[in-house]
Structures are given as structure tokens and as C-alpha cells.
Image (spheres, rainbow, N blue to C red):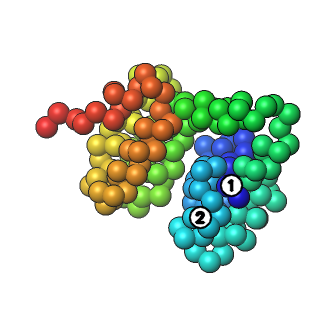
């Protein structure tokens, strides 16, 4: 089974409200429809199944198999729909906002505010690029590379080069 965020789950991550505690929020961020419950268990610990079940009961998560079974669309279009839906500036913005929120660093807090305030697409691209440039100073190289890899999956192709290109030295 592969847990996937519902619209409600994406909304609660974007609003940064008090609906979820840090552990629930972290689990919800990791529920991308690609990771199995076993993989999530390795990342979140022994109680991952119970945590995912709770998020599912509260309507934040849907198991990918359940979503495909309840859909009336042909299987090929069901598989293609999530990829297209996830490749958006909003998805990239939410992801980086959540990554910055997990960092306990004053620079991350400032970058979070900057990205949250960005409304124009060009401002969002600049804020994403700035956040990525500061991430190596706040986290490990491996973590930074995973974030860059995930952004490579969710960013619209038109913005990949602008956001992921290294800053001039």
C-alpha cells in the first residue's frame, strides 16, 4: 500500500495550522504515493502504520490502491494524473515551505517567511532558488540532494533550470 495525500492533506500542510503535530506533519509530507508502508516504517519508526492509519481516518491520506480502485477512469489515465497534478509551482512551494519549517534555524525561518510572502511566479522562483542555496549550510549534503531531487520531480519543467542551477560563486 502506498499512502497519498488527499486535497485536505495538501491544504493542512500549506496552511501550517495546529491541526497536526510535528510527527503527523512529517508523516504526511512523506506520503507521496510512491513510498510503501514498509518504506515509511523505516523512515518514521515502528508506529508508522498506526500514524498513517490515523491520518487516513482523518481524511489527510488515501491509500494509492484505494484511489485507483474507486476511480471510474481507465487505469492508464489514473497512473498519469498524479504525475501531472504534482508537477506544479504550488507543489514545489509547499514542499520547500515544509522543509524550511522542519529546520530549526533562524535563516530557515527568514527564508520560510520570504517564500510564504512570494505571490508572483518570478518571486517564488527566486525564493525557491535562495532557499536551495542556503540549505547545504543547514543540513547534510545527502538531505540537500534529496530535496533537490524531489524538486526536480515537482517543479514545472519551465522553471527547473532557473531554480536548480547553482548560484554563481
**Residue 88 percent location from the top left of the image:** 55, 30
Mark earlier in primary sequence (2, 1): 1
- Total marks shown come to 2
Asked if residue 92 is positioned above or below residue 98 in the image, the reply reads above
The residue at which mark 1 appears reads as 3
The residue at which mark 2 appears reads as 40
Q: Is residue 16 left or right of residue 160?
A: right
Q: Is residue 99 left or right of residue 10?
A: left
Between 65 and 86, the one nearer to me in the picture: 65
Callout 2 touching callout 1 (CB < 8 Å): yes
Q: Is residue 162 left or right of residue 78?
A: left
Answer few, some or many: residues within 10 Å of disc 1's Cα (few below 14, many 20 plus, some between 14 and 19).
many
**Residue 4 percent location from the top left of the image:** 68, 49
Answer few, some or many: residues within 10 Å of disc 2's Cα (few below 14, many 20 plus, some between 14 and 19).
many
**Residue 12 percent location from the top left of the image:** 67, 48
**Figure quadrant of residue 84:** top right
The residue sitting at 71% across, 32% down in the picture is 76
Q: CA distance from mark 2 to mark 1?
A: 9 Å
Between 16 and 43, the one nearer to me in the picture: 43
Q: Which numbered dot is residue 64?
A: none
Residue found farthest to the bottom: 46
**Residue 75 percent location from the top left of the image:** 75, 36
Element type at mark 2 = helix
The quadrant of the picture occupied by the N terminus is bottom right
Q: Is residue 109 left or right of residue 89?
A: left
Asked if residue 10 is positioned above or below residue 38 in the image, the reply reads above
Amino acid at each position: 500500500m502506498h499512502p497519498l495525500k488527499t486535497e485536505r492533506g495538501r491544504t493542512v500542510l500549506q496552511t501550517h495550522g495546529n491541526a497536526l503535530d510535528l510527527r503527523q506533519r512529517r508523516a504526511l509530507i512523506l506520503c507521496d504515493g510512491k513510498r510503501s508502508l514498509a518504506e515509511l516504517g523505516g523512515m518514521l519508526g515502528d508506529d508508522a502504520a498506526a500514524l498513517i492509519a490515523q491520518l487516513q481516518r482523518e481524511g489527510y491520506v488515501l491509500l494509492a490502491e484505494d484511489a485507483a480502485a474507486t476511480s471510474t477512469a481507465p487505469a492508464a489515465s489514473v497512473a498519469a494524473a498524479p504525475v501531472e497534478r504534482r508537477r506544479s509551482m504550488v507543489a514545489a512551494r509547499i514542499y520547500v515551505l515544509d522543509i524550511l519549517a522542519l529546520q530549526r534555524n533562524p535563516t530557515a525561518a527568514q527564508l520560510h517567511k520570504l517564500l510564504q510572502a512570494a505571490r508572483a511566479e518570478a518571486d517564488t522562483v527566486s525564493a525557491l532558488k535562495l532557499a536551495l542555496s542556503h540549505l547545504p549550510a543547514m543540513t547534510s549534503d545527502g538531505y540537500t540532494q534529496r530535496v533537490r531531487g524531489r524538486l526536480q520531480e515537482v517543479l514545472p519543467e519551465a522553471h527547473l533550470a532557473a531554480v536548480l542551477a547553482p548560484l554563481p560563486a
